[in-house]
Amino acid sequence: MNIEEAIKARHSVRAYKQQPLTDDTVKVLENAIEEQNRKGHLHIQLIKNEPKAFQGKLAKYGKFSNVSNYLVMAGQKADDLDERIGYYGEQLVLLAQTLGLNTCWVGLSYSKIPDTYVLEEGEVIKTYIAIGYGDNEGVSHKVKTIEKVSNTSDITPSWFRKGVEAALLAPTAVNQQKFFFEYIPARDGKPAQVIAKRSFSLIGYTKLDLGIAKYHFEVGAGKENFEWA
């Protein structure tokens, strides 16, 4: 399975088998985490065989079961931290899908268990990602139309539409999809540009969601076709 296939196959999964991650899978994940931490200036950590974080009341309310492996998504406080966590974290989520694993971004339904993670001075945890072998592959959800989340028209190139289509498959908080992509044609010797924007949400998480959607857009559109404005 490649990344494009993973985008289409991946759905949020909340119930997992009591099956530990294999040593080979852990090695691949930890190498990828190291790379994403370096690129995104983050402090993502893989926690293995630790069930307590998803045994509290919030986890039960979120209908999580048998979660014993998860990613702690942390980094230095910054205005763009949420977006970077979404952008680089989703790369780990899709990698996990290619490895035969299932995942779920988790905003509130977890407990922070002391001594399971390390935070440096100035670092904060923004979210967790449940990861493991799911009881099922999850289900797809209704998505907005391309026209609702972009300025797609008869004159926009096909790669832009493909990018928006991939973004519409990105996980967002309660499937809110509060993002918008605007195509700007190439001119004055400059390549085509794309503006990625988020709109207001009472639920929040729009910065995180935008980071996830931007990575999906890049995969669908091809990074060589445009620049972010």
Image (tube, rainbow, N blue to C red):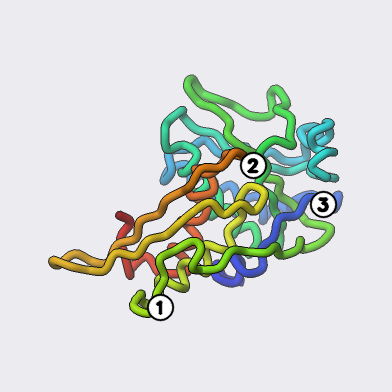
At which x and y percent is residue 52? 80, 32
Amino acid at the residue labelled 2: Leu
In the rendered image, which quarter contains the N terminus?
bottom right
Mark drawn on residue 225 = none
Residue highlighted by disc 3: 16
Q: Is residue 31 visible?
A: no
- Residue at position x 49%, y 20% from top? 121
Crowd band around label 2 with a 10 angstrom C-alpha radius: few (<14), some (14–19), many (20+):
many
Closer to the camera: disc 2 or disc 1? 1
Residue closer to the observer: 206 or 94: 206
Left or right? Give the position of 35 relative to 66.
left
Residue highlighted by disc 1: 158
User: Quadrant of residue 44 in the image?
Assistant: top right
At which x and y percent is residue 80? 42, 38
Residue highlighted by disc 2: 71
- Residue at position x 54%, y 48% from top? 209
